[in-house]
Amino acid sequence: MMKLLILLTGLVVLAGCGEQPQTITAKPGTSAAKADDVPYGEGKSFADRNAWQLQLRARADNQNEYKRVN
Amino acid sequence: MNRLFALFATLLMALAAMAALAQQSSGPVESPADLAKQEQQRSVTQPYNNAAIWKNARGAVEGYVSIPAPEAGVLIQDGGQNWRALRNGWFSVIGGWALVAMMLVIGGFYAWKGTVQLHDSPTGRMIERFTLLERMAHWGTAISFSVLAISGLILLFGKTLLIPVIGFTLFSWLAILAKNLHNFLGPLFIISCIITFIVFVRDNMLKAIDFKWIASFGGLISGKHVPSEKFNAGEKLWFWGGLMLLGLVVGVSGLVLNFPNFGQTRATMQLANLVHLTGATLFMLGALGHIYMGTLGMAGALDAMKTGVVDESWAKEHHEIWYDEQLKAGNVGNAGKAVAPGAKSPQPVAIGGHD
Amino acid sequence: MARMKFICDAERCIECNGCVTACKNEHDVPWGVNRRRVVTLNDGIVGAERSISVACMHCSDAPCMAVCPVNCFYKTEDGVVLHDKDLCIGCGYCFYACPFGAPQFPQAGAFGVRGKMDKCTFCAGGPEKDNSKAEHEKYGRNRLAEGKLPACAEMCSTKALLAGDGDVLSDIYRERVMRRGRGGDLWGHATAYGRPDAKATGPILQSIPQKS
């Protein structure tokens, strides 16, 4: 009886070894959601991803008031 | 027995420690007022050194915020990450495998012993075992429990087990259904538990004979017969440990989670969730055993809860003390219609069994 | 590849709640839901008062994503954590897990029954077609798709709250710290390296044995 109990406890404790790594790897398409729309491409405001990113970078850089005031 | 108890106590303490860990943050070492004073001094000698302010930011220190929501003034709460790690890790992994193991054990037991049949042939003289009220209370609890268990399992393991099979959209529908069933049937289950407790408590008082039953494991392994009352010690254990204790644990923690409109903090809800998970897993493990004994494991047990009456031979073989009492009281053969030996038992009273 | 981030400079935040108001207005956020809030520590204590504007920080290893039972969260290529309200079941787990208290739940019935979760989208909408009516109703305006940055940061009057590509923000912040001439919020720098003429009054300097 005692042996069985020790064996069972051991198994239960070892079950923790089955733990999966929890870090999320964000691969597009692995989520439940519908595919996200992108703001660039045919008929959109931006020709390609690069153009869009350049715009966003310029915009972010605009937040640096030293470049704007001085 | 002593060592067994020690082991159990250790496990319990480990669980409590884990729960405490989930709540622990890198909390205040120095009081906020002290740190504020330090910062005031620092703002003179070392301007722009904010170390004293941020020392407590990660913890339970609440700042001022214009939004009247509970805990809106907390910048960073640490408990969430611990809760996440425990829920997604230990609690669901150990709980999940424990359920699988229990099913395997029961399957193995069934392969070994099969259904326990009556040794004597039924006499056809029926005894009332469960009144209509008792059966209604039992099935009310049983049905709500089953729905809660299944919906709870869907919410905990569906992401891993069901999404790869049925896809995201369909699973989301299922999860919405499961969540609402779980939330609305939860309080109903608590009420059923209370009714069941009141109805059955008189017959579940522990007596000396029960310890004899436990010591010999109900004669399950030895095959030797141990007389028992209306409920044997195993059933009583399920009544006190399952229905009452686990019912209380799952019920209270469930209510904390179900009604977030009383301003309980996230730390409270994280703890309640872990307690709920533990209680529910133990409850389901017990229920698997209980359902097995009530259906596949023991011939005639399910009929007793369906129709409320049992055959004389069944009573004599499984609950001898209770049978003797009934015999003395002249109740044997009074219940239901007298049916010829070998005929089917009376038509079950229409109560929604889920067998 | 860009990694969208927020930075809040506690030396600059004046607790005007402009970001909170901008967010509410930009996305038509309903009453009781606050995607952004300003927390003030040591409120009213001169010299020790600091304010921080908090919203979803779009974590790299997002706890909300990890605990969501229906996997409704996703991350865009730019590191923005978004969610699909059509799949959300309103269980509240993301709210338990989030360190910043970002997920918000509109009350959808009696007894605090949770509706579908709402949170900061980094002004990037949701999975619906960009700038469509459906997207606007569920998630608010998609400024990122218009080539703009989050409204809260872009309208911050003291430029305490910055949003955008992490590299650009780092550059701005570095320049700011250099002009301040001090360690700024690079916590502990001033304490560790001190100023030659600083009097040994701070608790850490006092603890260092002085040469007599």
Image (cartoon, coloured by chain):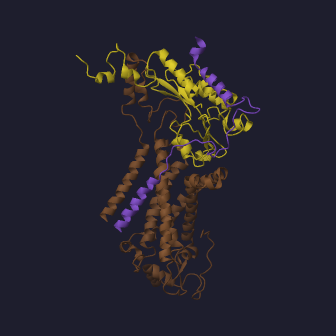
Chain colours: A purple, B brown, C yellow
In the image, residue B103 sits, relative to residue A60, either above or below, namely below
Question: Does residue B277 appear in this view?
Answer: no
The single residue placed furthest to the right in the displayed view is A43
The single residue placed furthest to the left in the displayed view is C212
Q: Which of C2/C87 is in front?
A: C2
In the image, residue B225 sits, relative to residue C124, either above or below, namely below
Question: Does residue B146 appear in this view?
Answer: yes
Q: Which of B260/B1 is in front?
A: B1
Q: Which of B199/B40 is in front?
A: B40
In the rendered view, does B348 fall on the left or right side of C182? right
Residue A44 in the image: x percent, y percent?
Answer: 74, 31
Q: Could you tell me which residue is drawn at 48 percent across and 50 percent down?
A: B89
Q: Could you tell me which residue is drawn at 40 percent across and 63 percent down?
A: A8
In the rendered view, does A16 fall on the left or right side of B307? left
Quarter of the image for the N terminus of chain B: give it. bottom left
Please give the count of numbered marks on the rendered protein: 0
In the image, residue B229 sits, relative to residue C194, either above or below, namely below
In the rendered view, does B330 fall on the left or right side of B171? left
Residue B184 in the image: x percent, y percent?
Answer: 60, 54
Q: Could you tell me which residue is drawn at 61 percent across and 76 percent down?
A: B348
Residue B301 in the image: x percent, y percent?
Answer: 52, 76
The single residue placed furthest to the top in the displayed view is A70
Picture quadrant where residue C46 is located: top left
Q: Could you tell me which residue is drawn at 76 percent across and 33 percent down?
A: A42
Quarter of the image for the C terminus of chain B: give it. bottom right
Residue C53 in the image: x percent, y percent?
Answer: 54, 28
In the rendered view, does C45 fall on the left or right side of A32? left
Picture quadrant where residue B138 is located: bottom right
